[in-house]
Amino acid sequence: MRHIRRRTLGPLALCAALTAASLVPLSAFARFDDDDGFRSGMVFTSSNSVDGNELLVYARGRHGALSLRARFATGGLGDGAGLGSQGAVTLSGDGRHLFVVNAGSHTVSTVHIGEHDLRVLSVVPSGGLHPISVTEHDGTVYVLNDAGAGNVAGFENAHGELRPIAGSVRGLSVAGGAAPAQIGFSDDGDALVVTEKNTNRLTSYPVLRNGTIGAPIITPSPGLTPFGFAFNRRNRLLVTEAAAGAAGASSVSSYRFAHDAKAQPTVVSASVADTQGSACWVAITPDGRYAYVANTGSGSLSSYRIDALGQIELAQAVAGATGTASAPADTAVSPDGRHVFTRNGGAHTIASFTIEADGRLAGAQFVDGLPAAAVGLAAN
């Protein structure tokens, strides 16, 4: 087989329901004439509308302020509600493609990011029902579907056209009812990880050279309701734990992967509390030193320090505030490490914070007018 991997509403309900402004709609093509174009300085989210999913693109100003630059159809349908997931909008590693789930039509769209234009290249079935999260590594794409029994399905990204990988569909730790939240590749691409909210488990799979995945490995979460996660460039994994929405009970755990067991996560720091409510989303700075956690139930972002071994400690319980009932959700850090963004499902805004040299956040700015059901966030 051809090798395709190339090495080079209580508070918790807000995490789902509130991830659940009408501007001028465009076609499946958008153009932006600017020196940097669309390949840098942009923030992306999706409308998740039942009348037709749209990609919304915001340009980042010098000090992090955002302004809408494009809005156009993905070619699929949203479901009009919160997906309860992280990773609904994902950039490819080379920055040339963006993948968007269309939960209402059970499809995934691939958007080409040109220097001065955006274009939908393909819309394909997700390999299951109700896709909620998508990830990519070196041309291999996997989608997480949460309806029916729930599964993961793999694709080859052939210049923007997703082609199913034969034998890549795998189930989760249970057949139905797992309530998965995110799918993601490890930084080295050797493992594929899924968080499951209802089972309190991480399900991971070894990634084989032909793009298929091996048998699932089940790892109990130290804390309740594992939700969003992120890897740093040392291949350390941080996972939020929403604690079933209990007030002040959220936490974050960190994991490492051994060289001789590349798909088996081992706990490094177990359930380090942030004293906030419904920690659901997380993003890590490019240097791997800081993580920012969106606490949906508390209207806040917490910050954590990460050492070289993957041990974590709480830096600030409230590093940034997004406002009462703002329900911060999807979170992303700019590639230059200067800003962190969070999509606020309750306020229908995106907040932009400046990241200081010591990891502290400053200068909160907000752009409003997001669709009520918007999901996903990515930055280039």
Image (spheres, rainbow, N blue to C red):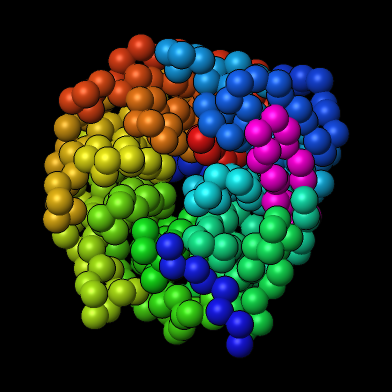
Magenta span includes 221: no
Say if residue 236 shows up in the picture: yes
Of residue 356 and residue 170, the one placed in the foreground of this image is: 356
Magenta residues?
104-120
**Total numbered badges shown on the rendered structure:** 0
Magenta span includes 107: yes
Q: In the rendered view, would you say 223 is above or below 357?
A: below
Residue found 82% across the figure and 38% down from its top = 28
353 vs 106, left or right, is left
Residue found 64% across the figure and 58% down from its top = 131
Query: Which percent across, then down, holds residue 165?
Result: 65, 76
Say if residue 249 shows up in the picture: no
Q: Main secondary structure of the magenta part?
A: strand
Of residue 9 and residue 24, the one placed in the foreground of this image is: 24
Query: Which percent across, then down, holds residue 1?
Result: 61, 87
Residue found 21% across the figure and 24% down from its top = 357
Q: In the rendered view, would you say 161 is above or below 104?
A: below
Query: Which percent across, then down, holds residue 158?
Result: 68, 63
Of residue 318 and residue 97, the one placed in the foreground of this image is: 97
Instruction: Looking at this view, name the residue that lies furthest to the bottom.
Output: 1
Residue found 70% across the figure and 30% down from its top = 116
Q: In the rendered view, would you say 323 is above or below 6?
A: above
Question: Can you tell which quarter of the image residue 340 is in?
Answer: top left
Query: Which percent across, then down, holds residue 325?
Result: 46, 23
Q: In the rendered view, would you say 210 is above or below 48?
A: below
343 vs 253, left or right, is right
